[in-house]
Amino acid sequence: MVFQSLVIAPAGLAQSSSEEEEPLTYSELLEDIEDGRVSRIEIDPSQDIARVELSDQEEDAPPEEVQLFIGENLELIERARENNIELEVKPSADSTAVAWLVTNTLIAVLIIGGLLLLLRRSANASGQAMNFGKSRARFQMEAKTGVMFDDVAGIEEAKEELQEVVSFLKQPEKFTAVGARIPNGVLLIGPPGTGKTLLAKAIAGEAGVPFFSISGSEFVEMFVGVGASRVRDLFRKAKESAPCIIFIDEIDAVGRQRGTGIGGGNDEREQTLNQLLTEMDGFENNTGIIVIAATNRPDVLDSALLRPGRFDRQVMVDLPGYNGRLGILEVHARNKKVSPDVSLEAIAQRTPGFSGADLANMLNEAAILTARRRKDSITPLEIDDAIDRVTIGLTLNPLMDSKKKRLIAYHELGHAMLMTLLEHTDPLDKVTIIPRSGGIGGFAKPLLRQDSVDDGLQTRSQILDLITVYLGGRASEDIVFGHDEVTNGASGDIKAVADYARRMVTRYGMSDLGMFAIESSDNQVFLGRDLMNQVPEYSEEMATKIDHQVRAIISQCYDRARSLLRDNRLLMDRLADMLIEQETIEGDKFREIVASFTDLPESQKNLQLQAIGRN
Ligand code: ADP
Ligand code: MG
Ligand code: ZN
């Protein structure tokens, strides 16, 4: 247990609860804390129970028991501390034994379950080998998707283009009467989570036709011929229920350029692809089937797929902009209870780069947090926490190890200070040393502004300042703990720095090498047809020059980071104490402190320092 005995417990504390009265709920407890009615709290983390003594309760009445849910004990500790309530964290001895037993039983069950699963798997695989010709319902069919265009937001152009497809499905006569050829296939192109699947379902929903779906990766199996027969099966079933939609997700898995890939072509995939093309070509002028496919790698697709009569309509489904995000938030807030002080506009502002799926996921997390905290509606607090949770990770228990905590505090402060001191940066949102899942010890997070994301309008000074901020963590460790004590915790920072610096030289023409771009984009294809073009097109001499430039940029920024931090070393020390004690400092508070210090004449700085953090 991390939180052993913060306060010594008075002996003989009653451990049973009052059974006849309504138990105290967590939210009532929080209210009682706020109103100063609580005199003492004892938390039992092994049972997730808080035993509460109220200030007005009778001398020897047993304490009230409150059931805690995940994360609530941390919150409770924080609240109790804020309100100076006597607090103890103490696992009850007997329950630890029970917990031990439970954990071990659980592990045993998991292992056995895992083994069974493996057995089942191999049994399945051999089963498949025996009847590989027949695809047993490897595609899904939904008679009614229940999704409407109203449920899809933020991709208005795509929606408009696809409106037409709905009309084709509903009234094909209208088009065939004037001799128009109805398209066989539509290709939706866009990054994951932007709503391609949703859009395809909405088309089926609007037109009121069945929806067949399969993923490209499911076509590609171990055994030659399976993919092709699956395609045949799928189209046969679809023809029986025409008009309908066939949706092929991840079509790049089958539809890659033929005859490429390391070690020659892949027969199986080629046969599957050929079968797919044959089926689509075999459509009479109007079979009432429209094939919709989705991919985020249109560049690797076989050109035969894109020929007229096949996927000749291509619709881009991009990451949503501000208005799009607002629309998507509105759609997903429709069925949730959101408190009136939550501003969807503000959320849309703060979430550049989020896909529709990210936004939906974030709102859902916020709703889960709200339920867990037993609130009636989602408040801005839950939104904040949910954004951190989807972008950074789940919160874990605070560290106790003070040396490590100090190091993390200085590292994150380095970032936070530079975010605040430098001119061309996004302002600090918060800095925290509460750890998160994924090995994150803490973070300093900027408040993203709509116009500050990589939109092609970033200036040279903005990028330089950004690199400097990234280097701030390492620079701070270096200054405070010395050159030999820097940790590998900054590896993520260093990678980002190297990426940015390199892009400045090779893509943005922002170095002494002048205006030239030799690398066009960084998403390169593995095993695709681009493989051959990946060899750099510049000489070794040029490569050396680039390296020099990149290094010059980085060391310049590092020097700047160090000298700025060194100039503010006293302030850093104060802030580090404060951060270690409070674990999180909000951006506004942080800026206020930094300003109250940096605006002072040298002679008064010492006095001011003593005042900081005393509250
Ligand atoms: P893709 O197929 O592009 O990877 P999905 O359609 O599977 O993305 O999106 C996953 C989920 O994210 C959807 O079920 C929906 O809840 C949400 N979502 C994504 N994009 C949108 C959008 N444009 N409008 C509303 N919800 C969206
Ligand atoms: Mg999808
Ligand atoms: Zn860092």
Image (cartoon, rainbow, N blue to C red):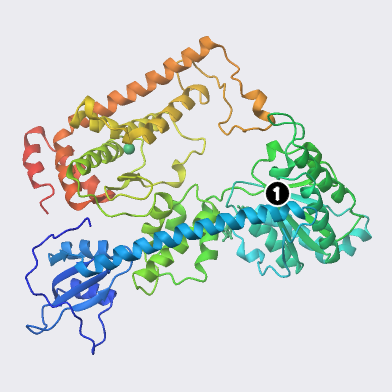
Q: 479 above or below 176?
A: above
Where does the image place residue 129, in percent across and percent down from the top left?
73, 51
Residue at the location (15% across, 40% down)? 597
Which amino acid, by three-letter code, is at mark 1? Gly
Where does the image place residue 397, in percent across and percent down from the top left?
27, 55
Q: Quadrant of the N terminus?
A: bottom left
- Tell me where residue 209 sits by quadrant: bottom right
For label 1, the crowd category at 10 Å Cα-Cα, with few meaning under 14, some 14 to 19 and many 20 or more, is many
Q: Quadrant of the C terminus?
A: bottom left
Mark 1 within 8 Å of ligand 2, using the beta carbon: no
Residue at the location (42% across, 46% down)? 449
Residue at the location (21% across, 61% down)? 78
Where does the image place residue 523, in percent across and percent down from the top left?
57, 34
Answer yes or no: is residue 147 visible: yes
- Tell me where residue 602 sits by quadrant: top left
Residue at the outermost bottom position? 20
Q: 611 above or below 163?
A: above
Where does the image place residue 313, in percent across and percent down from the top left?
77, 47
Residue at the location (22% across, 31% down)? 565
Q: Which residue is mark 1?
A: 216
Q: 518 above or below 544?
A: below
Find numbered disc 1 in the image and state the secondary structure of the residue it sits on.
Answer: helix
